[in-house]
Image (tube, rainbow, N blue to C red):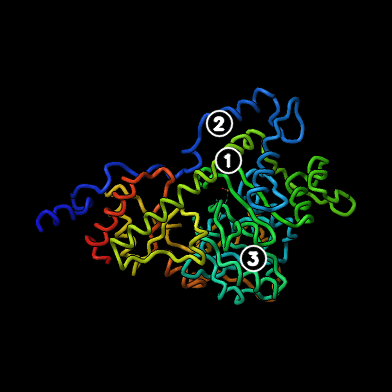
Amino acid sequence: MLMEKLLDKLAIDGGKPARSKPLPPNYPGAMAFGEEEVERVSRVIRSKSPFRFYGVDQQDTVRTLEEMMAKELKVPYVLGVTSGTAALMVALKALGIGYGDKVAVPAVTFLATATAVICCNAVPVFVDVDESLNMDPNDLERVLDGEVKAIITVPIVGVPVDMDPIMAIAARHGVKVLEDVAQSCGVMYKGRYAGTIGDIGTYSFQMNKILTAGEGGAVVTADRVLCERAVRYHDQGMCRPQLRERYGLDGKDEEMAFAGQNYRMSEITGAVLVEQWKKIDQIVGGMRRNYRKLREGLKSQIPTIEFRKSPDPEGDVGCTLGLRFKSALDAARFNEASAAENIGTYCLYGGKPVYVNPQISCQRSADGRGFPFNFPFKNPVNYGEGMCPRSMDLLPRTAFMPVSPLLGEQDIEEIIQGVAKLYRGLGLE
Ligand SMILES: *Cc1c(COP(=O)(O)O)cnc(C)c1O
């Protein structure tokens, strides 16, 4: 009994930490960097051809990445771009979103999902989340007022969105669907990769995401016209012969050209990502395996434990494990005490829906002249704090544990025992 008490003493109260060292850094792609990335980047440098469309000895790394992604995701058109945000801009512009449009965005997401809408001169409106912390299909029709032209779904840190009801509602209202899969490369829903279910999908390869080149992104679609519009927006409105021929695009400037940006992916980024993409099974497979072991182990140690829900647990990518508590205070106590045990769990986005951020709540774009919020919408947009009450309730009550593919058996056992100790010690059972 005394022994048990001693073992149960929390590290935060001076007990022995459950783990002697912190979890592996939460950069799964970068942690998997090896000589393969070095070699392929070096080849680009040695070939003196860092640009995808011409050079002296082209290595076609961006093209290779696009082909690898297309094959794995089973989608005909993939376009490499400079970032996940660029991918969102390109996808929104491909869908024709602009001034006078609204776009439905989940209340729980990273800033970029909502700010890309504003940077496209449209106005985001927010949909509450369900128990998965992703867009709640039951709250979607509340915002579809005829002025909403597209819906952006976001599988937040590894759990798929319940796409079937969302696709059905979108079809009924004649609204397009963009899947922002930035955080969840590899996540699946009913046997299909997220990103390939809606009209268009976007990926990010920033440092914090699952696969990385530091920066990078991609747009995927099965629609040839959306593909051509994406190609054009990402490349100054041009449709160069390389992509036109490969993808069988129309390419007629008189009908299709418009002003675009430069969001082209560099061959150096492409080189890193070709090697990263080859490791998707290793990285995502490792996460999934560890995520399942942690869930099963925790469930057997703590029968009352509540996890974040998923509409298709088979499809979870497993990059984080969400633990649900009765109150925000309990979650905060858990996060503080878990850090002392060297099991760093965290509160996602400070526990706040995206629309409370000043970048959105101030309704201001860079020119400061009220654009695009000044459009005379029939149904004016207001961002009240209490707009999405379930997000406000569920997000701060959830603690997220990063799950690395690098965790070994001993790490997993220490985490399970440590979390069980925390539930007992903090009275969270
Ligand atoms: C990170 C992220 C983005 C932006 O990706 P960048 O590559 O950093 O521009 C967009 N959407 C979501 C949901 C993200 O998590």
The residue sitting at the top extreme is 46
Q: Quadrant of the C terminus?
A: bottom left
- Distance of mark 1 from mark 3, alpha carbons? 31 Å
Task: Locate residue 320, reporting x and y percent.
Answer: 44, 54
Marks 1/2 in contact by CB < 8 Å: the verdict is yes
Task: Locate residue 425, reporting x and y percent.
Answer: 22, 60
Residue type at the position of mark 3: Ile
Q: Which residue is mark 1?
A: 278
Q: Secondary structure at mark 1?
A: helix
Residue type at the position of mark 2: Glu
Task: Locate residue 396, reporting x and y percent.
Answer: 40, 64
Q: Which residue is mark 2?
A: 36
Q: Is residue 368 visible?
A: no
Is residue 267 toward the left or the right of residue 345 in the image? right
Q: Residues within 10 Å of mark 2 (few under 14, many from 20)?
A: some
Q: Residues within 10 Å of mark 3 (few under 14, many from 20)?
A: many
Q: Secondary structure at mark 2?
A: helix
- Distance of mark 3 from mark 2, alpha carbons? 38 Å
Is residue 375 toward the left or the right of residue 158 in the image? right
Q: Earlier in the sequence, mark 3 or mark 2?
A: 2
Q: Residues within 10 Å of mark 1 (few under 14, many from 20)?
A: few
Q: Quadrant of the N terminus?
A: bottom left
Q: Which residue is mark 3?
A: 151
Task: Look at discs 3 and 2 and give the one toward the viewer.
Answer: 2
Q: Secondary structure at mark 3?
A: strand
Residue in front for this viewpoint, 2 or 362 = 2
Q: Is residue 66 above or below residue 308?
A: above
Q: Earlier in the sequence, mark 1 or mark 3?
A: 3
Residue type at the position of mark 1: Lys
Q: Is residue 108 above or below residue 23?
A: below
The residue sitting at the right extreme is 254
